[in-house]
Structures are given as C-alpha cells and as structure tokens.
Amino acid sequence: TDGGHTFTTITPSCFDAVAPPIAACDPTPRFIAPLAVDVNNPTHWVFGGEYVWNDTAGWSTVCAGTTCDLTNVHDTGTGHSITALAVNGAVTYAGWCGNCNIGGATPFASGIDTNFGGTWHKISAPNLPNRYLGGLTVDPANPAHVFAVYNGYWRRWIPGGGTGHVFESTNGGATWTNISGNLPDVPSDALVFSGGKLLLGTDIGAFIANAGNGVHTAWSRLGSTLPNTSLNNLRLDPGGSSVLAATHGRGLWRIQIGRAS
C-alpha cells in the first residue's frame, strides 16, 4: 500500500515462511499462483491453490496467522493446483492441473471447475485439451460466456494432449467450440475480449481476431513493434483504451485498441 516500499504476505499457503500458516491453509499453490479480479467489481478478488479462495476486502485484505479475509469456497481435488481464474460476480471459473508434470509416475491431467449454475462442478467437455491451461477470460456482460487458452503444442510432445489453443463457451462451460482457426500451433497464454475483438498473447507474439466467428476464426498478427519474445500475459488497461503485454524479459508494452502498431 506504499508504492512497493514494503510488502506484506497475504497468501494462505501452508508453506508460508514469513508467518505461521492459517488454519486449513492451501497445500498445493503453484510457484506463481493465479489471482483474478472480478471483471465488474475491483474489490472482489479470487485466489487459487488447490482451493478457490474468495475475497471481498480488496486492497484492505489481511491474511496472517489465524486471521484471513480469504474464504475457501471450493476444493478442486487432492494434488490439484489452479493455473488460471476468471470471475464475474457470483460466477468463478478455475482451471487446474494435477499431476502438473509431464512424464511422471502419475499421468498429467487438467480440467476446469466452475460454480456456474449455482453449484461447484468439474466441466465435462471431451474436446477440451488435456494440456496446461494458461488463461481464462470471462465476458463482463455475460458470465456464461467464457474463453479458455491452452499452453503446449498439440502436434507433438504431449501424446493425447488434444488439439487447439483457444476455446469458447456460451453456456457456462457445458460445451466448447475450438476457435483456434488459423493460429499456428504455439503455446498460448492469455486472451483479452473487448470491443468485439479477441486479442491473444502467445509464445511468438500477439494475435487479433473478430469475435463471434466460431471455428472459422481468422487470426492475424497484432502490431509490428513487439520484440521477438513470448508474451506471458495480456491485459486490458483499467481505462479500457489500450492493451498491456508483459513479455518474457523484454519489458511491458502497450497498444491502443484499434491500432496496428
């Protein structure tokens, strides 16, 4: 709260070395555990480890010792780790993996849990890839409208991992459409949905497409001045006029929506 001069641990992890862990702490958060802000409420936050943690205290959040503003609202399953979150009001989508390592004694697995419809459940969709889920994006105007973005290569390296990198659901995850279209087979990380456009960050840069074209989605390069590096994250800025791209080792970049450079 002081511009980065000091930081306070607020994660309910069982491995917190700064302070004693809270009761019923989270056993399997990822090294970089996801945090999502409600697309319509900046004081509503959701964190992910094995559990989905709900927080309505915003920037006043406190979580240390036996006191915590984060509430455990769902267990994705023993050994699972949440990799991506998306929140719109009472609806949360949580993508997870577990086992999260390819080639181990326990097979790799991934999935998506949601409380769309009022109760938590695992989404059952046979066409979703069994690969690392890098990002989830929910429509601010419709919590039933959600996108899932997958890492990995579908041609090789992950037998049985499934095809495609970008999937869209309009019914709360009951069914999904592969809208990867003409995208190259390259790990994809994050998607922004704004103004009828889809903007995608991948390991080889940024792409853009018109929303609503289904399986025939036509993607093209977004801009021309990004460094030749992967994009780890892509976010709409708070004002909604531009998109921010976080690169792997080459800094933070911004593009005005509707421009091509």
Image: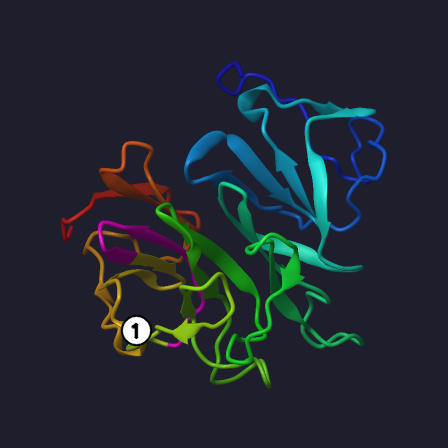
Residue toward you, 190 or 78: 78
What residue is at 32 percent from the left and 53 percent from the top? 193
Q: Farthest top residue?
A: 2
**Foreground of the two, 190 or 43:** 43
User: From the image, which quarter does the N terminus lie in?
Assistant: top right
At 78% from the left and 35% from the top, the residue drawn is: 16
Q: Is residue 102 above or below residue 145?
A: below
Residue 15 relative to residue 118: left or right: right
Q: Which residue is mark 1?
A: 214
Work out whether residue 139 or residue 64 is closer to the camera in this orientation and state it.
Answer: 139
Disc tally is 1
The colour style of the image is rainbow
Segment tinted magenta in the rendering? 185-198
| Magenta span includes 24 | no
Q: Position of residue 21 (x, y in %)?
A: 83, 32
Residue 140 lies in what quarter of the image? top left
Query: Helix, strand, or loop for circle 1?
Result: helix
Magenta stretch prevailing secondary structure: strand
Left or right of 196 in this view: 120: right
| Residue 239 picture location, percent across and down | 28, 32
Which quarter of the figure has residue 62? top right
**Residue 188 coordinates in the image, percent (x, y):** 43, 64
* Magenta-span inclusion, residue 189: yes
* Residue shown at the point (58%, 29%) measured from the top left: 56
Q: Is residue 168 above or below residue 44?
A: below
Taking the view exactly as shown, the residue that stands out farthest to the front is 118
171 or 208, which is in the foreground? Answer: 171
Vertical placement of residue 176 versus 145, above or below: below
Q: Identify which amino acid the numbered label 1 is placed on.
A: Gly
Classify 10 Å Cα crowding around label 1: few (below 14), some (14-19), many (20 and above). some
Coordinates of residue 211 in the picture (x, y in percent): 26, 62
